[in-house]
Image (cartoon, grey):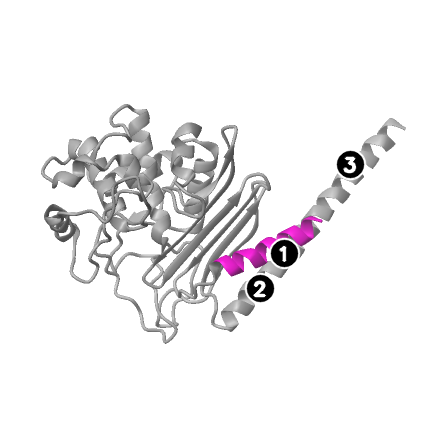
């Protein structure tokens, strides 16, 4: 009888595992059908990763790695992730604050007294919240960091008093990166690799890649005209699916910065605005959600992480269609339907 009970229990466990595996297979098939249909319709060319409770539900590369239509994407290809790359400088700022090397209430002129008088009114916190009053970068006339620095040195008037309003633009990001360099004593790109990504096991991240970078997805438009890989300001982290997921999990588990620091760059200054980590929700020092999207050239990326569901969705594309939120919603619906 004792042996029978053990066998019966083992059978029940096997049945349960088989049932769960079947459910996951149905999810994967439905997601795959959704994304491949989008690809056939010209609405998705890229890579996707869906994880639930630590298990990969779906992982695929769909489409081409460049405009030649000769090289298929692989899951090892890296992509520009647009504004999501701003998370690295936001996290770095909070890391340096935890190390007592700076304070986010510090004014910019503490680090760059050579800037005009407005630098004495802008805090690092204003930069993190996109509430500095700085105008956007002059994308049509600058070609590198030095050009942009000269523009800031010549700037005499802010668009609004720091902290009084909100304007999402890259001069906030640019100054955050320069402050990190000033405080750490090393270039920002080196800081990201040595202090942020390698310590958490990210091995394939690349900063500001050149055209010759291997396993780098190249962006192109609907006419398959490829973008030149030129970004006027530096400091853009490119990731593949696995490394992107490691970064997301590290944010969720506070393995780089603590919950208090995370909350300061997760919750925006106003509802519907962007923060250093994009946006999301925390409760009692626990991560509830972390949502961020980004665009660079014809690259687009989205991260949708809901720890309450144990779910993370990552979509990367090198043929922008402005539909990643819609595709994410469809994937969420598939997962929710199968969970019922």
Horizontally, is 281 left or right of 84 in the view?
right
**Which mark, residue 298?**
none
Give me the residue at 35% from left, 67% from top.
Answer: 66
| Badge 3 element | helix
Residue 228 seen from this side: yes
Badge 3: residue crowd in 10 Å (few <14, some 14–19, many ≥20): few
Residue 14 percent across, percent down from the top left: 75, 42
- Residue tagged 3: 10
Dot 3 or dot 1, earlier in sequence: 3
**Which mark, residue 34?**
2
Quadrant location of residue 218? bottom left
Q: Main secondary structure of the magenta part?
A: helix
Front one among 279 and 72:
279
Front one among 107 and 253:
107
Q: Looking at the image, how many numbered discs can be counted on the residues?
A: 3
Query: CA gap, disc 3 to disc 1?
Result: 30 Å
Give the vertical position of 186 relative to 239 (above or below): above
Badge 2: residue crowd in 10 Å (few <14, some 14–19, many ≥20): some
Horizontally, is 186 left or right of 269 in the view?
left
Residue 258 seen from this side: no
Query: CA gap, disc 1 to disc 2?
Result: 9 Å
Dot 2 or dot 3, earlier in sequence: 3
Q: What segment carries the magenta color? A: 325-340
């Amino acid at each position: 009888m004792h042996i029978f009970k053990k066998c019966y229990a083992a059978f029940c466990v096997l049945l349960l595992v088989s049932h769960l595996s079947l459910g996951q297979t149905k999810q994967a098939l439905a997601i795959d059908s959704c994304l491949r249909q989008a690809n056939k319709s010209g609405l998705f060319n890229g890579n996707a990763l869906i994880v639930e409770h630590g298990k990969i539900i779906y992982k695929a590369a769909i489409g081409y790695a460049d405009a030649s239509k000769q090289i298929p994407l692989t899951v090892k290809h890296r992509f520009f992730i647009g504004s999501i790359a701003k998370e690295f400088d936001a996290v770095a700022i909070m890391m340096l604050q935890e190390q007592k090397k700076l304070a986010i209430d510090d004014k910019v002129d503490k680090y760059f007294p050579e800037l005009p008088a407005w630098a004495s009114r802008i805090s690092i916190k204003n930069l993190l919240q996109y509430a500095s009053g700085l105008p956007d970068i002059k994308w049509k006339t600058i070609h590198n960091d030095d050009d942009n620095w000269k523009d800031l040195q010549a700037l005499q008037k802010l668009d609004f008093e720091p902290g009084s309003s909100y304007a999402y633009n890259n001069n906030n990001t640019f100054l955050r990166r320069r402050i990190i360099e000033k405080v750490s004593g090393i270039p920002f790109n080196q800081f990201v690799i040595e202090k942020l990504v390698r310590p958490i096991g990210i091995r394939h991240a690349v900063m500001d890649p050149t055209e010759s970078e291997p396993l780098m997805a190249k962006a192109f438009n609907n006419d398959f005209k490829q973008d030149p890989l030129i970004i006027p300001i530096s400091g853009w982290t490119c990731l593949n699916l696995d490394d992107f997921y490691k970064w997301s999990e590290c944010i969720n588990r506070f393995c780089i910065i603590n919950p208090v620091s995370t909350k300061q760059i997760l919750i925006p200054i106003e509802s519907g605005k962007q923060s250093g980590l994009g946006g999301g929700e925390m409760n009692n020092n626990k991560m509830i959600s972390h949502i961020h999207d980004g665009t660079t050239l014809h690259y687009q990326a989205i991260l949708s992480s809901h720890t309450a569901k144990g779910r993370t969705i990552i979509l990367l594309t090198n043929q922008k269609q402005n539909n990643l939120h819609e595709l994410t919603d469809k994937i969420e619906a598939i997962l929710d339907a199968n969970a019922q």
